[in-house]
């Protein structure tokens, strides 16, 4: 999947454009999962091509009077991580000094940059837009994010600009487990400990590890690739505690992974960044295992693992059965257990339930608690099955599918989880007309 980053100074209409781009797909995805947590990352498709969109502006706090330095970092990151960059400017305001700054950075880039001029909704503004040639980025695209006019052409150009080959080439078809988490959570330490030798240098200073790298493992008679994302921070000067950075740097790794091993720092707890990364994995329908690392540093009389786990589970609602393990990369506590659990989650995600077994169990479940009648009509579900999809999806056929609401779908999901092990794996439930 290609990754598109939207950059530009605050209030030029980045978010409105972002919402437009993701609208179609989003409506489907969110009605299925029932959750929307992040307005800065979404999936989109145009002419049959799928891509991910990141609104870099959405991550910058207090974005009304954002510092120039902040914008600069935002753009540098987009340059590092995205395949195509959309640079949004505003025809009403013309070229501002901050636009110049952004343009200067983008002129040096070899990746495709689309200059998108917003608020162009009449002929006069179309004329005014000519000024933006001065940014030195070549052709521009005019649009109006409010009405949506012009976005079709912009999307055509976007699809056109995608590189032929995906940036991440998957060499082997092995399962991919991505180790994700915020900087200094201990991702490199975890991987190094597993590798059993100090192949990489890990120090206390953020920004000293190398680029993302795959390590092939062969454990439990099972081959897989462990994908390290820790090293993706060449620009050590970037202030990494901004939520945006580690989240954005995880996007590609997560999209290409089967399972995400989310490493959190026990001394800091489950914070906003962890939540965003978890959500990203969930949204991409990946399996998740959470490792509470540095458990050696936590005074066991102040906080038991049970209390700690309960606190995290609250943050994960409604995803309640994600495995949570307490580990230490330093003392190598439970590291193999962590891997074993990850492999299990991988198996869970892959499992296929036969249609006869599924019906046998689920029809009983439905009979014992049928969907509530609506408007005096009875909803009947007579048949169901698992779809042959890469992630677990189940379809239930009903006479009146529109009357089967979220709570009942949640009930079905819970029952599925009770009878089969889908721990750590997102499930999709569809109700269709029979
Ligand atoms: P990354 O940025 O997520 O890859 O984090 P690193 O692996 O570079 O670790 C950051 C810092 O935390 C380093 O100083 C590690 O030595 C330290 N660290 C990592 N894991 C543990 C652990 O389990 N216990 C303790 N006490 N320190 C750890």
Image (tube, helix red, strand yellow):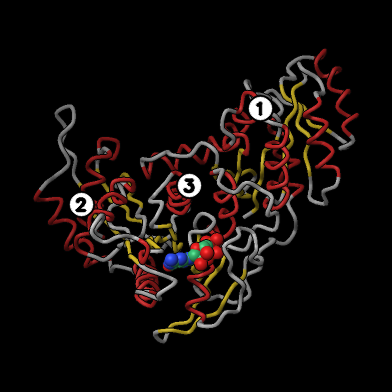
Residue 32 place in picture, x, y as percent? 38, 44
Upstream in sequence: badge 3 or badge 1:
1
Question: Marks 2 and 1, Cα distance to the nearest angstrom?
Answer: 53 Å
In the picture, measured across the screen, residue 217 lies left or right of residue 144, that is: left
Upstream in sequence: badge 2 or badge 1:
1
In the picture, measured across the screen, residue 415 lies left or right of residue 187, that is: left
Circle 3 residue = 273
Residue 100 place in picture, x, y as percent? 83, 31
Residue at image location 17% in from the left, 63% down from the top: 360
Dot 1: what SS?
A: loop
Residue 67 place in picture, x, y as percent? 68, 31
Q: Is mark 1 within 8 Å of ligand 1?
A: no
Residue 370 place in picture, x, y as percent? 14, 44
Figure disc tally? 3
C-beta proximity under 8 Å, tags 2 and 1: no
Residue extending farthest bottom: 221
Can residue 179 be seen from the camera position used here? Answer: no
Circle 1 residue = 10
Question: Of residues 301 and 391, which is closer to you in this image?
Answer: 301
Residue at image location 25% in from the left, 46% down from the top: 410
Note whether 225 is above or below 7 in the view shown.
below
Note whether 226 is above or below 234 in the view shown.
below
Question: Of residues 84 and 77, which is closer to you in this image?
Answer: 77
Circle 2 residue = 382
Question: Marks 3 and 1, Cα distance to the nearest angstrom?
Answer: 22 Å
Query: Which mark is on residue 42?
Result: none
Residue density around tag 3, few if under 14, some if 14–19, many if 20 or more, within 10 Å: some
C-beta proximity under 8 Å, tags 3 and 1: no
Upstream in sequence: badge 2 or badge 3:
3
Q: Is mark 2 within 8 Å of ligand 1?
A: no
Question: Marks 2 and 3, Cα distance to the nearest angstrom?
Answer: 43 Å
């Amino acid at each position: 999947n290609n990754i598109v980053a939207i950059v530009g100074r605050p209030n030029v209409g980045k978010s409105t454009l972002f919402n437009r781009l993701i609208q179609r797909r989003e409506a489907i995805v969110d009605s299925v999962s029932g959750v929307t947590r992040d307005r800065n990352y979404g999936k989109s498709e145009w002419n049959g091509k799928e891509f991910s969109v990141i609104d870099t502006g959405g991550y910058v706090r207090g974005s009304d009077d954002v510092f120039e330095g902040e914008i600069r970092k935002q753009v540098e990151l987009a340059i590092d991580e995205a395949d195509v960059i959309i640079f949004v400017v505003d025809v009403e305001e013309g070229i501002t000094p901050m636009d110049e700054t952004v343009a200067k950075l983008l002129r040096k880039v070899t990746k495709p940059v689309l200059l998108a001029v917003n608020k162009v909704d009449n002929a006069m503004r179309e004329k005014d837009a000519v000024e933006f040639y001065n940014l030195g980025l070549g052709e521009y695209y005019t649009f109006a994010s409010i009405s949506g006019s012009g976005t079709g052409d912009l999307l055509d150009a976007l699809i056109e600009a995608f590189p032929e080959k995906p940036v991440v080439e998957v060499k082997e078809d092995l399962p991919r487990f991505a180790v994700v988490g915020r900087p200094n959570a201990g991702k490199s330490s975890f991987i190094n400990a597993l590798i059993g030798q100090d192949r990489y240098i890990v120090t206390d200073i953020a920004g000293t590890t190398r680029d993302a790298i795959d390590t092939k493992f062969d454990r439990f008679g099972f081959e897989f690739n462990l994908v390290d994302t820790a090293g993706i921070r060449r620009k050590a000067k970037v202030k990494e505690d901004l939520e945006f950075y580690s989240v954005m740097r995880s996007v590609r790794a997560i999209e290409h992974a089967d399972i995400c091993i989310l490493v959190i720092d026990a001394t800091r707890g489950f914070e906003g960044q962890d939540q965003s990364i978890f959500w990203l994995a969930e949204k991409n329908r990946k399996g998740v295992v959470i490792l509470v690392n540095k458990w050696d540093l936590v005074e066991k009389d102040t906080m038991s693992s049970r209390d700690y786990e309960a606190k995290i589970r609250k943050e994960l609602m409604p995803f309640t059965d994600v495995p949570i393990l307490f580990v230490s990369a330093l003392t190598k506590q439970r590291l193999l257990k962590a891997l074993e659990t990850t492999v299990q989650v991988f198996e869970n995600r892959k499992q296929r339930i036969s249609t006869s077994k599924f019906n046998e169990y689920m029809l009983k479940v439905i009979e014992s608690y049928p969907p509530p009648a609506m408007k005096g009509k009875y909803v009947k579900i007579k048949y169901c099955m698992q779809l042959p999809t890469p992630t677990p999806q189940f379809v239930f056929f009903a006479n009146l599918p529109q009357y089967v609401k979220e709570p009942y779908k949640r009930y079905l999901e819970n029952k599925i989880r009770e009878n089969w092990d889908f721990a750590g794996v997102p499930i999709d439930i569809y109700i269709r007309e029979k």
